[in-house]
Image (cartoon, grey):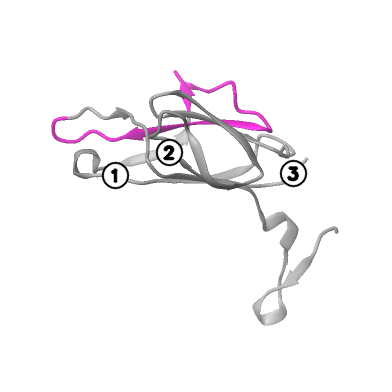
Amino acid sequence: AGSIAVTGEGNSTTTNLQQGLTKAWVFFDGDESTVSAADSFNESSMTDNAVGDYTFVVTNAMANTNYSYSTSVLCEDNATRGPKALGLRVDGSDVATSNTTTTRRFECLKGARDGSDGGAQDTQNGSIQYVGDLA
């Protein structure tokens, strides 16, 4: 109920605990025919738009679109090893228009390597965490 300030080590600084909490997260399998959450918090649904292209919807809206997020994906096998990242989906030079206070669209991309030019790829294990203010 309200904001809690926590005094840090040395008693010289305080941290707003409420503002520093993760507001939503999801651990998902994007390699199935239907994208599914293995576990989540404040995540209401997800959509598989195309190969490696996912939209996630949070249950309780964020206060604005300037919240922070972090992502991770699994490199499944030797055929797909190399750089691989889950980041905001872009359309040309613009961030996808579906990014709002309740939805974010992410794309899983693998980097180029011998015999592959890289590109979008479904991921077996992905995770996203959102930090910011709720509406």
Q: Secondary structure at mark 3?
A: loop
- Residue 28: numbered disc: none
Q: x%, y% of residue 11?
A: 72, 79
Name the residue beneath numbered marker 3.
Answer: 134
Q: Secondary structure at mark 2?
A: strand
Name the residue beneath numbered marker 1.
Answer: 76
Q: Residue furthest bottom?
A: 10
- Badge 2 density bin: few <14, some 14–19, many ≥20, Cα 10 Å: many
Does residue 23 lie above or below 50 as drawn? below
- Badge 1 density bin: few <14, some 14–19, many ≥20, Cα 10 Å: few
Of the residues under marks 2 and 1, which one precedes in the sequence? 1
Q: Quadrant of residue 78?
A: top left
Is residue 85 in the magenta section? no
Quarter of the image with the C terminus in it: top right
- Residue type at the position of mark 2: Leu
Of the two numbered discs 2 and 1 in the rendering, the one whose residue sits closer to the viewer: 1
Q: x%, y% of residue 101?
A: 69, 33
Q: Residue furthest front?
A: 33
Q: x%, y% of residue 111?
A: 28, 35
Q: Over which residues does the magenta segment extend?
A: 89-115
Name the residue beneath numbered marker 2.
Answer: 86
Q: Secondary structure at mark 1?
A: loop
Structural distance between the alpha carbons of marks 2 and 1 = 14 Å
Q: x%, y% of residue 80?
A: 24, 39
Q: Residue furthest right?
A: 1
- Residue type at the position of mark 1: Glu
Structural distance between the alpha carbons of marks 3 and 2 = 23 Å
Q: Going 50% across and 37% down the picture, which residue do you hit? A: 36
Does residue 6 lie above or below 130 as drawn? below
Does residue 59 lie above or below 22 as drawn? above
